[in-house]
Amino acid sequence: MIEVSGLTVRFAGVTPIDDVSVVFPGGTCGLIGPNGAGKTTFFNVLSGFVKPAAGSITAFGENMLRMADFRRARWGLRRTFQTEMAIEKLSIYDNVAMIHEHSGAKRTTRRADVLSAMEFVGLEMSPKVKVGSLGARERRLVEVARAVVGNPRVVLLDEPAAGLPDEETGLLGEVIHRIPGEFGALVILVDHDMSLVSSCCETTAVLDFGKLIASGPTAEVLRNEHVIRAYLGTEEEL
Amino acid sequence: MSVAGARTSRAEIARAVERGVVVRGVIIAALLLFVVLAVPALVGADWLTTFASVLIYAIVACGFGILYGRVGMISLGQVALLSIGCWIGTRLAYATSLPFPILLLVVGLITGVIGTLVGLPSLRLSGLYLALITLMFAGATTIVLAVIDFPNGGGGFKGRSATGALTTSTPPVRRPSMAVGDTAFFRYIVIVTALMFLLALLHVSGKPGRAWASIRESEPAALAAGVNITVYKMWAFGLASFMTGVAGCLLAAQVGVPRAITFQTQDSLTLAATSLIGGIFSIWGAVIAGIFNQLLPFIFQAQWNVNSNFLLIIFGVGLLQVLLTAPGGLAEQVPRDMAKLARLVWHGARRLTGGRKKSP
């Protein structure tokens, strides 16, 4: 469980996150909102790239904001970025093993852990293949494999399906949905694809202009009129 | 593909990879033996000295390759570090009676610490700014050494004689007792170079190499992956400077009278250029860089009697060529183009013979 309370982030004159209090109970949680709503900023606070002006984040009883940024991975925080960050020059194995090495997981289980993460996301190819030679779908899968290896506790996925065709998005959604059961990790999924969010996430929180406007079970949240107005409002205009 | 099919093909791939590793190992071992045993017998003394410099500069280029090719930090002060290693080696050789391998190690470690300090700005700066800072360091090193007239020819650690004259009474920097002669010391240099390359390869293929690749790709992503960026950047500078320091100590013993060498600031730039031409991602690239840096000037100047400054133009053109067509340098480009050529010849030959078969 992640408890966020009174979180405020200020950049010169802008408040991308404004006094947000929300609870991510567990399983797969969606975090949605229009562009500029503060979703990625929230991830950056969790990663330690951005220092909030006020507020606290407690994850599984641990005060996240006190931890040094690079130590959070060892604690069990994983994340992907909007742009893909799999390392082209390294093989799939090295890409995933690299996360394992800094996760504090046992060295003796590295090979088995890396291969089972590859199997979990459905990468059926030689681990020695260079990531630079892979297509968009496989690279995204490598990123998910990187996010689940080495005992993750919180997995942050920032638009993992960006640029993928619908069918492949669906398959990726199935993989994401299985993460909490398989690894016991809490997943927070940011995406613009409503079908992905509604198929993966049990609960969803909605941000708009840095403020939390709704949170709760996904189906209820997506029916909420504030959400429809703020986020899906384009339908009314059509 | 069926499961069984996938399994056999995976086993085949693994076998092919292993075969590739074995073949490559045999080729490298044969090449190493050739260089150690045959080269000294085949060439004259001046060539041998040049080949020794080629190897020494190849170590420096290998360090540059780690910094720029692996971590993405450009350092234009590598030859300055070489000069520092050379001077520390010289002074320690006079002032102490350490066995030569220990001397190499100590000089490497001291230079490693200095290089790490020089690399500190890389934690905040990158690209052009880091390049400028390291170039300033190279310039400062040259100027300081010139102004304090270090060493002016005396013995001991300070290297100063009261008269200030470049005395000839100081003996040359000692070499390892097992390799005093030029040929034996050349072999010694080959072995130390191979060890340095091995050290670099072990780093690159292991945990540091993966962390460096991650930093090079994206620092935020590396941080999110739990990489302590400070430690790994400093580690890269430490390793590259350690190797460069060892190379400097070898250079001191190779030349014997290092005060005869003048290190210039622009040498660091030439080294960066030749490293990029050779290829910053591989050991072969470092060797090619050593050849460009030391062998070509020797051939131009001593063999053809052409001013070796002309080489700067060639390096410029070569650098342009490499940056435009082959980011991996000649080490990547030559095998690729040779393979293309071989395929072209092979297809041409097949078409010719195929045409003959059809004609009757």
Image (cartoon, coloured by chain):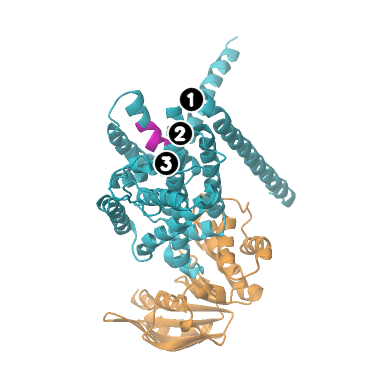
Q: Which mark is residue B171?
A: 3
Dominant SS type (magenta): helix
Q: Which mark is residue B51?
A: 2
Which residues fall within the magenta stretch? B291-297
Query: Compared with residue A57, is residue B265 higher up or lower down, i.e. above or below?
Result: above
- Residue B296 inside the magenta-drawn segment: yes
Left of B29 or right of it: where is B316? left
Amino acid type indicated by mark 3: Pro
User: How many residues crowd mark 3 within 10 Å: few (<14), some (14–19), many (20+)?
Assistant: few
Q: Are marks 1 and 3 in contact (CB under 8 Å)?
A: no
Q: Chain of mark 1?
A: B
Left of A191 or right of it: where is B28? right
Amino acid type indicated by mark 2: Phe
Question: In the figure, residue B322 lies in which quadrant?
Answer: top left
Residue B197 % position (x, y): 52, 46
Q: Chain of mark 2?
A: B
Q: In the rendered structure, which disc, 1 or 2, sits on the residue that comes first in sequence?
A: 1
Q: Nearer the viewer, mark 2 or mark 3?
A: 3
Structural distance between the alpha carbons of marks 2 and 3: 24 Å
Q: Are marks 2 and 3 in contact (CB under 8 Å)?
A: no
Query: Compared with residue A201, is residue B123 higher up or lower down, i.e. above or below?
Result: above
Residue A46 % position (x, y): 46, 78
Q: Are marks 1 and 2 in contact (CB under 8 Å)?
A: yes
User: How many residues crowd mark 2 within 10 Å: few (<14), some (14–19), many (20+)?
Assistant: many
Q: Which mark is residue B43?
A: 1
Left of A10 or right of it: where is A176? right
Residue B254 % position (x, y): 45, 39
